[in-house]
Amino acid sequence: MHVLVPAKSFAAAKSRLAAVMDAAARAGLARAMLRDVLAAVAAARGVGRILLVSAEPEAGRLAAAAGADWLPECTSLGMNAAVRAGAAHLSTAGQAPLLVLPSDIPMLQAAEVEALAAILAAPPRRAGLVRCADGGTGALGLPPGAGPLFRFGPDSHARHRQALLAAGLGPVSLDLPGAARDIDLPADLAALETGPAGPATRAFLDGGGLRPAAAAAVPQLAAGTR
């Protein structure tokens, strides 16, 4: 199974957190979350190639540190275009199941990646889906030769499911808490404090990566609980 991780440039990432985090903090959080996603994938069994698609200048270094490849974007193409480009790039290495993971799920566990790999490896031919709380897609797994069935964006889980059914692929929805927890809004920051965030994200939080306004917006952070 190949794994594809699209990522915005850090300067452009997490804009919906601007009310509680300044630009430097948002970039730092995006960097830390990407590192944790790549590390979880690299630790999982059954993973072949890992490809990071991003216009971020640091992406090559971060990918190499995780044993991944980097496909640079000249400009940010948007998530669906980035995923299509990455899938086409990986297809040159031969057909294999494809797992697409966003870069902002820092609670992702290696065991969750392995669970998705198992769904894609076992007959019958089917897809794997993880739904985020906001209706987005925390993971999309496709069998070999499934085609570019990418519908990322608002309510993408429902749109992915519809596209997979239309393509004759029975989508299996998995309950994987780490993959399902994306960090987009100020309210999501509490989950980082109380949940099993990856080591890079945890170090970012413990190092004071959130400015006071962000901590005040999240009671757990303001109280300094762990």
Image (cartoon, rainbow, N blue to C red):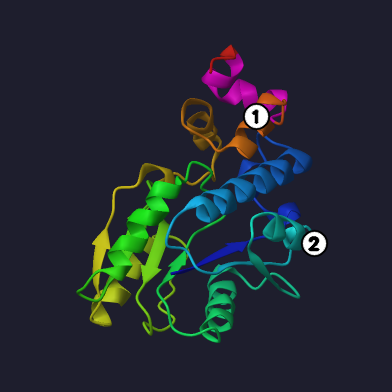
What main secondary structure does the magenta stretch of the protein show?
Answer: helix
In the rendered view, tell whether residue 200 sits above or below residue 15: above
Residue at screen point 42% across, 62% down = 46
* Residue occupying image coordinates x 41% and y 59%: 139
Q: Dot 1: what SS?
A: helix
Choose the circle earlier in sequence order: 1 or 2.
2
215 horizontally vs 181: left or right: right
Image quarter where the N terminus lies is: bottom left
Number of numbered discs present?
2
Reply above or below: 22 against 163: above
Q: Percent from the top left, x then y, of residue 115? A: 33, 55
Query: In which quadrant of the rendered view does residue 127 lie?
Result: bottom left
Per the image, the residue denoted by label 1 is 205
Counting from the top left corner in percent of width and height, residue 128 is at 32, 64
Per the model, the C-alpha gap separating discs 1 and 2 is: 23 Å
Q: Which residue lies furthest to the front in this view?
A: 45
Left/right of residue 9 with respect to residue 79 in the rendered view: right
**Residue 5 placement (x, y as % from top left):** 56, 63
Which element type, helix, strand or loop, lies under badge 2?
Answer: loop
Left or right of residue 97: residue 199: right
Residue depicted at x 45% and y 45%: 109
- Tell me which residue sits at (48%, 41%) in the image: 107
Specify start and end residues of the magenta stretch as a single range: 210-222
Q: Which amino acid does label 1 sit on?
A: Leu
How busy is the neighbourhood of tag 2: few (under 14 within 10 Å), some, or many (20 plus)? Answer: few
Amino acid carrying mark 2 in the image: Pro
Assess whether mark 2 and mark 1 are in contact (beta carbons under 8 angstroms): no
Is residue 218 a member of the stretch shown in magenta? yes
The residue to which callout 2 is attached is 57
Look at the image and tell me whether residue 158 can be seen: yes
Q: How many C-alpha atoms fall within 10 Å of the one at disc 1: few (<14), some, or many (≥20)?
A: some
